[in-house]
Image: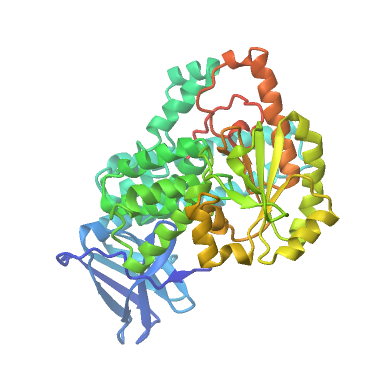
Amino acid sequence: MRIVLFFVFAFGVMGLQAQNQMKFKINGLQNTEVYLANYYGNKLYYNDTAKTDDLGFVNFEGKKFEEGGKYALVTPGPKFFEFLVADEDIYIETNVNNLVEDMVIHQSENNKVYYEYLNFISDKRKEREPIDAVLNDSTATEKEQKPFREKLEKLNQEVVDFQKNIVAEHSEKLVGKILNLAVDIEVPEEIKKQGEEDPAVQYYWYRAHYWDNVDLNDPRLVRDQMFHRLLEKYYTKILPQIPDTLCNEAIKLAEMMGNYDMKKYTIHYITYSSETSNIMCMDKVFVRMVDEYYKQGKADWLDEEQLTKVIESADKKRNVLCGEPVMNIILPDTSGVKWESLYAIDAKYTVIMIWESTCGHCKKELPVLLDLYHDWKDRGLEVYAIGNDFETEPWIKYVKEKNLDWINVSDNPEINDADSARVLILNGTTTLPSLNFRTTFDVFSTPKLLLLDKDKRIIAKQLSAEQLEDLLSNLEKDEQEKEKGAAGEDQGEVLPNDPKATDGKKAKKAKASNSRG
Protein backbone atom coordinates (compact mmCIF):
# COMPACT_ATOMS: atom_id res chain seq x y z
CA MET A 1 0.00 0.00 0.00
CA ARG A 2 1.39 3.39 -0.99
CA ILE A 3 1.23 6.19 1.55
CA VAL A 4 2.12 9.82 1.05
CA LEU A 5 2.73 11.82 4.22
CA PHE A 6 3.02 15.60 4.35
CA PHE A 7 5.24 17.25 6.94
CA VAL A 8 2.73 19.86 8.05
CA PHE A 9 2.16 20.81 11.65
CA ALA A 10 0.03 23.93 11.21
CA PHE A 11 -3.39 22.38 11.69
CA GLY A 12 -3.42 22.06 15.50
CA VAL A 13 -5.44 24.37 17.71
CA MET A 14 -3.90 25.68 20.91
CA GLY A 15 -5.72 24.72 24.06
CA LEU A 16 -5.70 22.51 27.15
CA GLN A 17 -4.23 19.03 26.74
CA ALA A 18 -6.74 16.17 26.75
CA GLN A 19 -6.42 13.40 29.38
CA ASN A 20 -7.10 10.38 27.18
CA GLN A 21 -4.05 8.37 26.17
CA MET A 22 -3.12 6.28 23.11
CA LYS A 23 -1.15 3.08 23.77
CA PHE A 24 0.00 0.57 21.15
CA LYS A 25 1.89 -2.70 21.29
CA ILE A 26 3.53 -3.69 18.02
CA ASN A 27 4.85 -7.23 18.45
CA GLY A 28 8.07 -7.72 16.50
CA LEU A 29 8.92 -4.02 16.45
CA GLN A 30 11.28 -3.23 19.31
CA ASN A 31 13.22 0.02 19.82
CA THR A 32 12.00 1.43 16.53
CA GLU A 33 10.68 4.86 15.65
CA VAL A 34 7.02 5.00 14.59
CA TYR A 35 4.85 7.91 13.55
CA LEU A 36 1.42 9.16 14.44
CA ALA A 37 -0.37 10.71 11.48
CA ASN A 38 -3.77 12.28 11.03
CA TYR A 39 -6.02 12.73 8.05
CA TYR A 40 -6.96 16.24 7.03
CA GLY A 41 -9.44 15.83 4.22
CA ASN A 42 -8.04 13.27 1.80
CA LYS A 43 -4.38 13.61 2.80
CA LEU A 44 -2.38 12.13 5.64
CA TYR A 45 -0.09 14.40 7.67
CA TYR A 46 2.62 13.62 10.18
CA ASN A 47 1.46 14.53 13.67
CA ASP A 48 3.90 13.06 16.18
CA THR A 49 6.72 10.56 16.56
CA ALA A 50 7.80 8.12 19.29
CA LYS A 51 9.91 5.00 19.77
CA THR A 52 8.76 1.52 20.74
CA ASP A 53 10.36 0.01 23.84
CA ASP A 54 11.94 -3.44 24.30
CA LEU A 55 8.49 -5.08 24.30
CA GLY A 56 7.07 -3.12 21.37
CA PHE A 57 5.02 -0.68 23.45
CA VAL A 58 4.66 2.94 22.35
CA ASN A 59 2.53 5.72 23.83
CA PHE A 60 1.17 8.98 22.48
CA GLU A 61 -0.62 11.66 24.41
CA GLY A 62 -4.31 11.99 23.66
CA LYS A 63 -5.85 14.76 21.60
CA LYS A 64 -8.24 17.52 22.47
CA PHE A 65 -11.81 17.01 21.25
CA GLU A 66 -11.43 19.30 18.22
CA GLU A 67 -8.30 17.41 17.13
CA GLY A 68 -10.01 14.03 17.06
CA GLY A 69 -10.86 12.11 13.92
CA LYS A 70 -9.23 9.40 11.83
CA TYR A 71 -5.55 8.83 12.56
CA ALA A 72 -2.94 6.27 11.51
CA LEU A 73 0.04 4.60 13.14
CA VAL A 74 2.87 4.39 10.61
CA THR A 75 5.60 1.77 10.93
CA PRO A 76 8.72 1.30 8.76
CA GLY A 77 7.99 0.38 5.15
CA PRO A 78 6.01 2.49 5.41
CA LYS A 79 3.04 0.41 6.56
CA PHE A 80 0.18 1.72 8.60
CA PHE A 81 -3.23 1.04 10.11
CA GLU A 82 -6.01 3.53 10.74
CA PHE A 83 -7.90 4.12 13.96
CA LEU A 84 -10.31 6.66 15.41
CA VAL A 85 -9.33 9.19 18.04
CA ALA A 86 -12.21 10.28 20.26
CA ASP A 87 -12.67 11.18 23.93
CA GLU A 88 -11.56 7.78 25.27
CA ASP A 89 -8.38 5.87 25.99
CA ILE A 90 -6.99 3.64 23.25
CA TYR A 91 -5.02 0.43 23.62
CA ILE A 92 -4.39 -1.54 20.44
CA GLU A 93 -2.10 -4.55 20.02
CA THR A 94 -0.98 -6.00 16.71
CA ASN A 95 1.90 -7.68 14.86
CA VAL A 96 4.38 -5.80 12.67
CA ASN A 97 3.94 -8.31 9.84
CA ASN A 98 0.13 -8.25 9.85
CA LEU A 99 -0.95 -4.90 11.22
CA VAL A 100 -4.65 -5.24 10.48
CA GLU A 101 -5.16 -9.01 10.39
CA ASP A 102 -3.58 -9.58 13.84
CA MET A 103 -5.11 -6.53 15.49
CA VAL A 104 -6.64 -6.81 18.94
CA ILE A 105 -8.41 -3.76 20.35
CA HIS A 106 -8.11 -3.99 24.11
CA GLN A 107 -9.58 -0.57 24.79
CA SER A 108 -11.68 1.91 22.72
CA GLU A 109 -15.34 1.37 21.94
CA ASN A 110 -15.13 3.52 18.79
CA ASN A 111 -12.37 1.39 17.31
CA LYS A 112 -14.03 -1.90 18.26
CA VAL A 113 -17.13 -0.85 16.31
CA TYR A 114 -15.05 0.62 13.48
CA TYR A 115 -13.08 -2.59 12.93
CA GLU A 116 -16.21 -4.68 13.29
CA TYR A 117 -17.51 -2.70 10.32
CA LEU A 118 -14.26 -2.99 8.33
CA ASN A 119 -14.09 -6.75 8.91
CA PHE A 120 -17.71 -7.12 7.83
CA ILE A 121 -17.00 -5.19 4.61
CA SER A 122 -13.91 -7.31 3.98
CA ASP A 123 -15.94 -10.53 4.32
CA LYS A 124 -18.62 -9.20 1.96
CA ARG A 125 -16.01 -8.29 -0.63
CA LYS A 126 -14.78 -11.87 -0.60
CA GLU A 127 -18.37 -13.08 -1.06
CA ARG A 128 -18.73 -10.75 -4.02
CA GLU A 129 -15.69 -12.00 -5.94
CA PRO A 130 -17.36 -15.08 -7.52
CA ILE A 131 -20.45 -12.98 -8.29
CA ASP A 132 -18.39 -10.36 -10.11
CA ALA A 133 -16.57 -13.10 -12.01
CA VAL A 134 -19.85 -14.25 -13.58
CA LEU A 135 -21.23 -10.73 -14.16
CA ASN A 136 -17.99 -9.68 -15.86
CA ASP A 137 -17.90 -12.80 -18.04
CA SER A 138 -18.80 -11.64 -21.55
CA THR A 139 -19.64 -15.22 -22.56
CA ALA A 140 -22.30 -15.63 -19.84
CA THR A 141 -25.90 -15.30 -21.01
CA GLU A 142 -28.42 -12.99 -19.43
CA LYS A 143 -30.22 -16.02 -18.01
CA GLU A 144 -27.01 -17.27 -16.42
CA GLN A 145 -26.22 -13.84 -14.98
CA LYS A 146 -29.69 -13.12 -13.56
CA PRO A 147 -29.37 -15.12 -10.29
CA PHE A 148 -25.97 -13.53 -9.68
CA ARG A 149 -27.44 -10.06 -10.14
CA GLU A 150 -30.01 -10.97 -7.51
CA LYS A 151 -27.24 -12.19 -5.19
CA LEU A 152 -25.34 -8.96 -5.69
CA GLU A 153 -28.40 -6.87 -4.94
CA LYS A 154 -29.00 -8.87 -1.76
CA LEU A 155 -25.35 -8.54 -0.76
CA ASN A 156 -25.39 -4.78 -1.29
CA GLN A 157 -28.52 -4.47 0.80
CA GLU A 158 -26.88 -6.43 3.63
CA VAL A 159 -24.00 -3.93 3.62
CA VAL A 160 -26.38 -0.96 3.62
CA ASP A 161 -28.45 -2.41 6.46
CA PHE A 162 -25.36 -3.23 8.54
CA GLN A 163 -24.02 0.28 8.03
CA LYS A 164 -27.34 1.90 8.96
CA ASN A 165 -27.66 -0.23 12.09
CA ILE A 166 -24.22 0.81 13.31
CA VAL A 167 -24.97 4.48 12.62
CA ALA A 168 -28.29 4.25 14.46
CA GLU A 169 -26.86 2.41 17.45
CA HIS A 170 -23.79 4.67 17.77
CA SER A 171 -25.15 7.96 16.42
CA GLU A 172 -23.50 10.04 19.15
CA LYS A 173 -20.12 8.34 18.88
CA LEU A 174 -17.43 9.42 16.45
CA VAL A 175 -17.60 6.04 14.69
CA GLY A 176 -21.31 6.52 14.00
CA LYS A 177 -20.77 10.02 12.64
CA ILE A 178 -17.89 8.94 10.40
CA LEU A 179 -19.72 5.94 8.96
CA ASN A 180 -22.78 8.13 8.42
CA LEU A 181 -20.75 10.23 5.99
CA ALA A 182 -20.94 7.36 3.51
CA VAL A 183 -24.66 6.68 3.90
CA ASP A 184 -26.67 7.63 0.82
CA ILE A 185 -29.30 10.33 1.14
CA GLU A 186 -32.67 8.63 0.55
CA VAL A 187 -35.02 10.62 -1.63
CA PRO A 188 -38.67 10.20 -0.52
CA GLU A 189 -40.92 8.33 -2.93
CA GLU A 190 -43.16 11.37 -3.22
CA ILE A 191 -40.22 13.47 -4.43
CA LYS A 192 -39.13 10.74 -6.84
CA LYS A 193 -42.63 10.65 -8.28
CA GLN A 194 -42.66 14.41 -8.74
CA GLY A 195 -39.20 14.15 -10.25
CA GLU A 196 -40.52 11.93 -13.03
CA GLU A 197 -42.54 14.90 -14.23
CA ASP A 198 -39.99 17.58 -13.38
CA PRO A 199 -36.37 16.45 -12.71
CA ALA A 200 -35.66 19.80 -11.08
CA VAL A 201 -37.87 18.85 -8.11
CA GLN A 202 -35.73 15.85 -7.22
CA TYR A 203 -32.50 17.71 -7.94
CA TYR A 204 -33.28 20.65 -5.66
CA TRP A 205 -34.56 18.34 -2.90
CA TYR A 206 -31.36 16.31 -3.06
CA ARG A 207 -29.21 19.42 -3.11
CA ALA A 208 -31.02 20.87 -0.09
CA HIS A 209 -30.56 17.62 1.89
CA TYR A 210 -27.09 16.68 0.64
CA TRP A 211 -25.41 17.45 3.98
CA ASP A 212 -28.08 15.85 6.19
CA ASN A 213 -25.81 12.97 7.22
CA VAL A 214 -22.91 15.23 8.19
CA ASP A 215 -22.68 16.72 11.68
CA LEU A 216 -21.49 20.14 10.56
CA ASN A 217 -20.75 21.10 14.17
CA ASP A 218 -18.24 18.31 14.75
CA PRO A 219 -14.71 19.40 13.69
CA ARG A 220 -13.41 15.83 13.94
CA LEU A 221 -15.15 14.83 10.71
CA VAL A 222 -12.84 16.97 8.61
CA ARG A 223 -10.14 14.45 9.55
CA ASP A 224 -11.65 11.76 7.37
CA GLN A 225 -11.27 11.21 3.62
CA MET A 226 -15.03 11.01 3.14
CA PHE A 227 -15.54 14.64 4.10
CA HIS A 228 -13.27 15.67 1.23
CA ARG A 229 -15.10 13.38 -1.20
CA LEU A 230 -18.47 14.80 -0.19
CA LEU A 231 -17.22 18.36 -0.54
CA GLU A 232 -15.58 17.67 -3.89
CA LYS A 233 -18.70 16.01 -5.29
CA TYR A 234 -21.01 18.75 -4.05
CA TYR A 235 -18.89 21.56 -5.43
CA THR A 236 -17.91 19.99 -8.79
CA LYS A 237 -20.94 17.82 -9.63
CA ILE A 238 -23.99 18.75 -7.58
CA LEU A 239 -23.71 22.51 -7.97
CA PRO A 240 -24.02 23.85 -11.52
CA GLN A 241 -20.58 24.59 -12.92
CA ILE A 242 -21.52 28.17 -13.78
CA PRO A 243 -19.17 30.79 -12.29
CA ASP A 244 -21.87 33.32 -11.42
CA THR A 245 -23.91 30.64 -9.64
CA LEU A 246 -20.87 29.24 -7.85
CA CYS A 247 -19.82 32.69 -6.61
CA ASN A 248 -22.93 32.79 -4.44
CA GLU A 249 -23.14 29.08 -3.63
CA ALA A 250 -19.49 28.95 -2.56
CA ILE A 251 -20.11 31.54 0.15
CA LYS A 252 -23.29 29.75 1.28
CA LEU A 253 -21.39 26.47 1.50
CA ALA A 254 -18.55 27.93 3.54
CA GLU A 255 -20.95 29.65 5.93
CA MET A 256 -22.93 26.43 6.32
CA MET A 257 -19.98 24.79 8.06
CA GLY A 258 -20.61 25.06 11.78
CA ASN A 259 -17.05 24.76 13.07
CA TYR A 260 -13.67 26.39 12.42
CA ASP A 261 -11.90 23.36 10.90
CA MET A 262 -14.62 22.48 8.41
CA LYS A 263 -15.05 26.10 7.38
CA LYS A 264 -11.30 26.53 6.96
CA TYR A 265 -11.04 23.37 4.86
CA THR A 266 -14.02 24.35 2.71
CA ILE A 267 -12.75 27.88 2.06
CA HIS A 268 -9.30 26.60 1.11
CA TYR A 269 -10.73 23.85 -1.10
CA ILE A 270 -13.04 26.19 -3.04
CA THR A 271 -10.37 28.88 -3.39
CA TYR A 272 -7.72 26.49 -4.68
CA SER A 273 -10.13 24.55 -6.92
CA SER A 274 -11.48 27.67 -8.58
CA GLU A 275 -8.00 29.14 -9.10
CA THR A 276 -6.69 25.98 -10.79
CA SER A 277 -9.90 24.90 -12.55
CA ASN A 278 -9.86 24.04 -16.26
CA ILE A 279 -13.42 25.32 -16.59
CA MET A 280 -13.51 28.67 -18.31
CA CYS A 281 -14.11 31.75 -16.13
CA MET A 282 -13.88 29.86 -12.83
CA ASP A 283 -11.27 32.37 -11.64
CA LYS A 284 -14.26 34.62 -10.96
CA VAL A 285 -15.06 32.38 -7.99
CA PHE A 286 -11.43 32.57 -6.87
CA VAL A 287 -11.52 36.37 -6.80
CA ARG A 288 -14.84 36.34 -4.95
CA MET A 289 -13.46 34.00 -2.26
CA VAL A 290 -10.35 36.16 -1.83
CA ASP A 291 -12.48 39.28 -1.46
CA GLU A 292 -14.85 37.63 1.00
CA TYR A 293 -12.35 35.86 3.24
CA TYR A 294 -8.68 36.53 2.56
CA LYS A 295 -8.94 40.30 2.16
CA GLN A 296 -11.19 40.53 5.20
CA GLY A 297 -8.66 38.91 7.51
CA LYS A 298 -10.74 35.76 7.91
CA ALA A 299 -8.08 33.39 6.55
CA ASP A 300 -6.07 33.49 9.76
CA TRP A 301 -4.36 30.17 9.01
CA LEU A 302 -2.05 31.87 6.47
CA ASP A 303 1.00 33.89 7.38
CA GLU A 304 1.46 37.39 5.99
CA GLU A 305 3.62 36.29 3.06
CA GLN A 306 1.20 33.57 1.95
CA LEU A 307 -1.77 35.91 2.33
CA THR A 308 -0.09 38.58 0.22
CA LYS A 309 0.57 36.10 -2.59
CA VAL A 310 -3.07 34.96 -2.66
CA ILE A 311 -4.39 38.52 -2.74
CA GLU A 312 -1.90 39.57 -5.44
CA SER A 313 -2.90 36.58 -7.57
CA ALA A 314 -6.57 37.58 -7.31
CA ASP A 315 -5.83 41.21 -8.13
CA LYS A 316 -4.04 40.18 -11.34
CA LYS A 317 -7.17 38.38 -12.52
CA ARG A 318 -9.60 41.08 -11.44
CA ASN A 319 -9.63 42.97 -14.76
CA VAL A 320 -10.40 39.92 -16.90
CA LEU A 321 -13.36 38.28 -15.20
CA CYS A 322 -16.16 36.83 -17.32
CA GLY A 323 -19.32 38.91 -17.35
CA GLU A 324 -17.43 42.06 -16.39
CA PRO A 325 -16.46 44.91 -18.75
CA VAL A 326 -12.77 45.19 -19.61
CA MET A 327 -10.89 48.44 -19.17
CA ASN A 328 -10.68 50.67 -22.20
CA ILE A 329 -7.34 50.31 -23.99
CA ILE A 330 -5.94 53.09 -26.16
CA LEU A 331 -2.77 52.28 -28.10
CA PRO A 332 -1.18 53.44 -31.39
CA ASP A 333 -1.53 51.51 -34.64
CA THR A 334 1.35 50.51 -36.92
CA SER A 335 1.80 54.13 -38.04
CA GLY A 336 2.61 55.13 -34.49
CA VAL A 337 0.46 58.20 -34.98
CA LYS A 338 -3.15 57.05 -34.88
CA TRP A 339 -4.36 55.94 -31.45
CA GLU A 340 -7.07 53.27 -31.50
CA SER A 341 -9.54 53.06 -28.62
CA LEU A 342 -11.07 49.69 -27.78
CA TYR A 343 -14.27 51.36 -26.60
CA ALA A 344 -14.61 53.22 -29.91
CA ILE A 345 -15.27 49.92 -31.68
CA ASP A 346 -18.94 49.58 -32.58
CA ALA A 347 -19.43 45.84 -33.06
CA LYS A 348 -21.67 43.07 -31.79
CA TYR A 349 -18.58 41.09 -30.81
CA THR A 350 -14.99 42.20 -30.28
CA VAL A 351 -12.02 39.88 -29.98
CA ILE A 352 -8.99 41.06 -28.05
CA MET A 353 -6.01 39.11 -29.35
CA ILE A 354 -2.66 39.57 -27.58
CA TRP A 355 0.16 38.02 -29.55
CA GLU A 356 3.87 38.15 -30.44
CA SER A 357 5.62 37.92 -33.81
CA THR A 358 8.12 35.39 -32.39
CA CYS A 359 5.51 33.18 -30.71
CA GLY A 360 5.18 29.80 -32.45
CA HIS A 361 1.67 29.14 -31.14
CA CYS A 362 0.61 32.63 -32.23
CA LYS A 363 1.78 31.93 -35.76
CA LYS A 364 -0.49 28.86 -35.88
CA GLU A 365 -3.51 30.65 -34.43
CA LEU A 366 -3.33 33.92 -36.38
CA PRO A 367 -4.14 32.49 -39.85
CA VAL A 368 -7.15 30.63 -38.43
CA LEU A 369 -8.35 33.74 -36.64
CA LEU A 370 -7.82 35.83 -39.78
CA ASP A 371 -10.03 33.52 -41.84
CA LEU A 372 -12.62 33.61 -39.09
CA TYR A 373 -12.45 37.42 -39.02
CA HIS A 374 -13.11 37.64 -42.75
CA ASP A 375 -16.06 35.26 -42.44
CA TRP A 376 -17.60 37.10 -39.49
CA LYS A 377 -16.69 40.74 -40.13
CA ASP A 378 -19.98 41.46 -41.86
CA ARG A 379 -21.84 39.57 -39.11
CA GLY A 380 -20.68 41.90 -36.37
CA LEU A 381 -17.14 40.81 -35.44
CA GLU A 382 -14.12 43.06 -34.97
CA VAL A 383 -10.61 42.15 -33.79
CA TYR A 384 -8.48 44.40 -31.61
CA ALA A 385 -5.04 42.78 -31.91
CA ILE A 386 -2.41 43.92 -29.42
CA GLY A 387 1.20 43.19 -30.30
CA ASN A 388 3.13 42.04 -27.27
CA ASP A 389 6.54 42.56 -28.89
CA PHE A 390 8.82 44.93 -27.01
CA GLU A 391 10.37 46.06 -30.29
CA THR A 392 8.20 47.77 -32.90
CA GLU A 393 9.89 46.68 -36.15
CA PRO A 394 9.28 42.88 -35.96
CA TRP A 395 5.63 43.48 -35.07
CA ILE A 396 5.00 45.90 -37.97
CA LYS A 397 6.84 43.63 -40.41
CA TYR A 398 4.75 40.60 -39.44
CA VAL A 399 1.47 42.54 -39.65
CA LYS A 400 2.29 43.68 -43.20
CA GLU A 401 3.66 40.34 -44.42
CA LYS A 402 0.59 38.42 -43.22
CA ASN A 403 -1.91 41.11 -44.26
CA LEU A 404 -3.48 41.30 -40.82
CA ASP A 405 -6.21 43.74 -41.81
CA TRP A 406 -7.97 44.05 -38.45
CA ILE A 407 -7.17 46.74 -35.86
CA ASN A 408 -3.49 46.38 -34.94
CA VAL A 409 -2.06 48.25 -31.93
CA SER A 410 0.95 47.99 -29.67
CA ASP A 411 3.24 50.00 -27.44
CA ASN A 412 6.89 50.77 -28.10
CA PRO A 413 10.03 51.72 -26.14
CA GLU A 414 9.52 55.43 -26.86
CA ILE A 415 6.00 55.44 -25.46
CA ASN A 416 7.05 53.52 -22.36
CA ASP A 417 9.73 56.03 -21.52
CA ALA A 418 8.66 57.50 -18.17
CA ASP A 419 8.51 61.11 -19.36
CA SER A 420 6.69 60.25 -22.60
CA ALA A 421 4.16 58.05 -20.80
CA ARG A 422 3.46 60.74 -18.23
CA VAL A 423 2.75 63.36 -20.92
CA LEU A 424 0.53 61.01 -22.95
CA ILE A 425 -1.53 60.14 -19.87
CA LEU A 426 -1.83 63.73 -18.65
CA ASN A 427 -2.95 65.09 -22.04
CA GLY A 428 -5.57 62.34 -22.36
CA THR A 429 -4.03 60.52 -25.31
CA THR A 430 -3.96 57.21 -23.44
CA THR A 431 -4.27 55.73 -19.97
CA LEU A 432 -2.06 53.91 -17.49
CA PRO A 433 -4.01 50.59 -17.87
CA SER A 434 -3.42 50.89 -21.63
CA LEU A 435 0.33 51.28 -21.33
CA ASN A 436 0.31 48.50 -18.72
CA PHE A 437 -1.89 46.22 -20.84
CA ARG A 438 0.23 43.18 -19.96
CA THR A 439 -0.72 43.62 -16.30
CA THR A 440 -4.23 44.82 -17.08
CA PHE A 441 -4.99 41.64 -19.03
CA ASP A 442 -2.88 39.30 -16.86
CA VAL A 443 -0.70 38.31 -19.81
CA PHE A 444 1.60 35.49 -18.71
CA SER A 445 1.64 33.72 -22.09
CA THR A 446 0.59 34.34 -25.67
CA PRO A 447 -1.61 34.13 -27.59
CA LYS A 448 -4.32 35.38 -25.25
CA LEU A 449 -7.81 35.76 -26.64
CA LEU A 450 -10.86 37.42 -25.07
CA LEU A 451 -14.32 37.58 -26.64
CA LEU A 452 -16.35 40.67 -25.71
CA ASP A 453 -20.00 41.56 -26.27
CA LYS A 454 -21.22 44.90 -27.63
CA ASP A 455 -20.81 46.47 -24.17
CA LYS A 456 -17.23 45.19 -23.93
CA ARG A 457 -18.09 42.62 -21.27
CA ILE A 458 -16.12 39.37 -21.39
CA ILE A 459 -18.15 36.49 -22.81
CA ALA A 460 -15.29 33.98 -22.91
CA LYS A 461 -11.50 33.83 -22.72
CA GLN A 462 -8.48 31.58 -23.18
CA LEU A 463 -10.06 30.27 -26.38
CA SER A 464 -8.40 28.93 -29.49
CA ALA A 465 -9.48 30.40 -32.81
CA GLU A 466 -11.32 27.14 -33.58
CA GLN A 467 -13.20 27.25 -30.27
CA LEU A 468 -14.06 30.88 -30.94
CA GLU A 469 -15.73 29.93 -34.21
CA ASP A 470 -17.84 27.28 -32.47
CA LEU A 471 -18.83 29.73 -29.75
CA LEU A 472 -19.81 32.45 -32.21
CA SER A 473 -21.94 29.94 -34.13
CA ASN A 474 -23.70 28.89 -30.93
CA LEU A 475 -24.27 32.51 -29.94
CA GLU A 476 -25.73 33.22 -33.36
CA LYS A 477 -28.05 30.20 -33.11
CA ASP A 478 -29.19 31.24 -29.64
CA GLU A 479 -29.96 34.71 -30.93
CA GLN A 480 -31.95 33.30 -33.85
CA GLU A 481 -33.93 31.05 -31.51
CA LYS A 482 -34.76 33.98 -29.25
CA GLU A 483 -35.97 35.94 -32.22
CA LYS A 484 -38.30 33.04 -33.06
CA GLY A 485 -39.82 33.16 -29.60
CA ALA A 486 -37.60 30.66 -27.79
CA ALA A 487 -36.96 33.29 -25.13
CA GLY A 488 -40.29 32.30 -23.57
CA GLU A 489 -38.75 29.12 -22.21
CA ASP A 490 -37.53 28.92 -18.62
CA GLN A 491 -34.09 30.54 -18.46
CA GLY A 492 -33.46 29.55 -14.80
CA GLU A 493 -30.44 27.84 -13.31
CA VAL A 494 -29.17 24.91 -15.36
CA LEU A 495 -28.95 21.57 -13.59
CA PRO A 496 -25.54 19.95 -13.08
CA ASN A 497 -24.38 17.59 -15.84
CA ASP A 498 -26.41 19.69 -18.27
CA PRO A 499 -24.30 20.36 -21.40
CA LYS A 500 -25.27 24.02 -21.24
CA ALA A 501 -23.40 24.32 -17.97
CA THR A 502 -20.08 23.59 -19.66
CA ASP A 503 -20.14 24.00 -23.42
CA GLY A 504 -23.03 26.32 -24.18
CA LYS A 505 -25.02 23.71 -26.08
CA LYS A 506 -28.76 23.31 -25.76
CA ALA A 507 -29.93 22.23 -22.32
CA LYS A 508 -31.11 18.71 -21.60
CA LYS A 509 -33.10 17.54 -18.59
CA ALA A 510 -31.01 15.70 -16.05
CA LYS A 511 -31.79 13.84 -12.85
CA ALA A 512 -29.57 14.33 -9.83
CA SER A 513 -27.62 11.34 -8.62
CA ASN A 514 -28.41 10.01 -5.16
CA SER A 515 -25.06 8.28 -4.71
CA ARG A 516 -22.61 9.42 -2.04
CA GLY A 517 -19.72 7.64 -3.78
Residue 188, given in percent of the width and then of the height, sits at 42, 23
Residue 366, given in percent of the width and then of the height, sits at 78, 51
Up-down: is 183 above or below 90?
Answer: above
Look at 39% across and 30% down and name the residue there.
208
User: Which quadrant would residue 103 be assigned to in this image?
Assistant: bottom left
Image position of 11 (left or right of 145):
left
Up-down: is 369 above or below 514?
Answer: below
In the image shown, does 400 or 129 lie closer to the viewer?
A: 400
Up-down: is 252 above or below 120?
Answer: above
Look at 54% across and 21% down and name the residue there.
491
In the image shown, does 197 or 514 lie closer to the viewer?
A: 197
Image position of 433 (left or right of 261):
right
Look at 43% across and 32% down and name the residue there.
207
Image position of 110 (left or right of 373):
left
Residue 279, given in percent of the width and then of the height, sits at 58, 46
In the image shown, does 161 or 73 lie closer to the viewer?
A: 73
Residue 5, given in percent of the width and then of the height, sits at 44, 70
Q: Is residue 157 visible?
A: no
Look at 51% across and 66% down and name the residue there.
418
In the image shown, does 445 or 38 lie closer to the viewer?
A: 445
